[in-house]
Structures are given as structure tokens and as C-alpha cells.
Amino acid sequence: MTEIGTTDYRGVQVILLVNNSDDTKHRIAEELGKDLTIRLYRAFVHDILDTLDSSDLRYAISLYPENSDVSEWLDRNVDIYAQRGDTPIERVKNTFVDAFSRGEKNVMVLVSDIPDIPAEEVMEAIYSFKDSDVVIGPSVDGGYNLIGFSEESFRESAFDNISWGTDMAFADTAEKLGGMKIYLLSPWPDIDTIANLRSLLRDKRNPKFQSSHTMKILSETNLVSKSSCGV
């Protein structure tokens, strides 16, 4: 077993996957419209970055499409690297490959559609690395929204023939990691649909999230009133 071997949380770089294309979250856009959905997604990104900042974590952004410009909405001092690959899962794999080639030793990749994930959950993942080969944060729909390796424990094969975004992504990935010590976080829901947004509003999974960028955008929709009525 190859462990990260450090208790220094800044020894792990967190890399946030950001989709800056116009068609992100298309299932939500069908009801809220494209412009509002883009603003909402950008709020997701800001909320996660705020969470990382609050924990003094070292982080970067992995950006898709590779030549897109986020300067108009992301005014932060953060390193941004282009995603490489033809499919989402290839781009996740290459995010690790590129980070390790830059000299990183411990990397955790985080998706950007879990805006309400608590800092405590992220820190649990960071600290779990010292006793594990890999850490995974499952999503409630069968995928996963967080995965981390050390340079020594990284397996490119963990991303081969994985159907990203399906209900088998987590199970198939875990199978490819056979023989490794895996640390599993509690499942956390990601936001892909209007139903997910209603659940976010109704369940209030993270009390600190009520003053977030995301909640401010959602206050412009009728989802807030519907949620308060139990719809």
C-alpha cells in the first residue's frame, strides 16, 4: 500500500473542475433558461472556492473548454489549467496526469456541482489520505463527485471505460481500484436537475449555505417559494 504519508493538509492540491461552456447544466436550463443557469453554475463555483478558502486549502482550477476565458466572472488569484481529453472522464484522468507532471505529489479532484458541500467534508477527505491509497466521495445517484490520489497510488486505469455521469460510475471505478485501501466519504448529492435544486432548498443540508452565492441566485426564481410549500 502506498499512502500519502503526510498530515499537512497543504500538501494536497485540490483541483476544481470548471465547465465554462454555454450549455452547462442543460437539464436545469430547460426550466430556468440558459442565462440564469449559467449565472447559477458560476455561483456554484464561487461557493466551492469560498469553502476552500475558508479552510486555507491550496487549490487550482481545471478549465473546460481549454481556450475559454473566465476573467469576466472569476476575479480570483487562482492558477487555471486547461482540461485535456475528448470525454469528461478522460479530462478527469488528464487533470491528475497533468498535476503530477507539474510536480504535485497529492491531488484531489472535485466537481463543481456540489456547491453546498461543507468544509468539514472536504477536510475529512484531505486528512484521510494519510492512511489510504485513494479517497472517493460518492454522489447519491451512483456517481462520484470527489476523488484523490497520491502520485504513487495513482492508477490511470481507474478512469478507463468509465461512463461518467451514470449510476454505475462509482461502482465501476471502485472495482478498478481492487486491492487498494479506499476511504469513502458519506454520499453527497450533486446538482444536475430542477429536482436536485428543490432538494437543496428543502433539505438545508449545510446551514452555513443559506447566505451563499447560489442561494442569492435561487432567490430570483420561483423555486424558493415552491420549496417552502413542500413542492
Image (cartoon, rainbow, N blue to C red):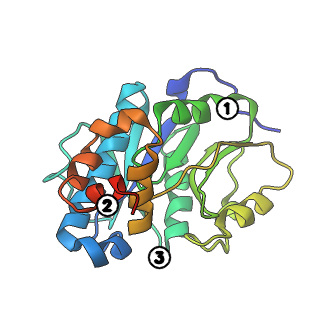
Compared with residue 145, is residue 7 higher up or lower down, i.e. above or below?
above
- Mark 2 lies on a secondary structure that is helix
Residue 128's disc is 1
User: CA separation, marks 1 and 2?
Assistant: 39 Å
Can residue 12 be seen from the camera position used here? no
First reached walking from the N terminus: tag 3 or tag 2: 3
Give the residue at mark 3: 86
What amino acid is labelled 3 in the image?
Asp
Residue 226's disc is 2
| Extreme-left residue of the structure | 72
What amino acid is labelled 1 in the image?
Ser
Task: Give the crowd class for mark 2: few <14, some 14-19, many >=20 residues within 10 Å.
Answer: few
Which quadrant, please, contains the C terminus? bottom left
Task: Give the crowd class for mark 3: few <14, some 14-19, many >=20 residues within 10 Å.
Answer: few
Residue at the (61%, 62%) spot, across then down = 143
First reached walking from the N terminus: tag 1 or tag 3: 3
Mark 1 and 2 residues: CB-CB less than 8 Å, in contact?
no
Mark 1 and 3 residues: CB-CB less than 8 Å, in contact?
no
User: How many circles with numbers are drawn on the protein?
Assistant: 3
From the viewer's perspective, is the residue at label 1 or at label 3 nearer? 1
Can residue 52 be seen from the camera position used here? yes
In the picture provided, is 178 more to the left or to the right than 165? Answer: right
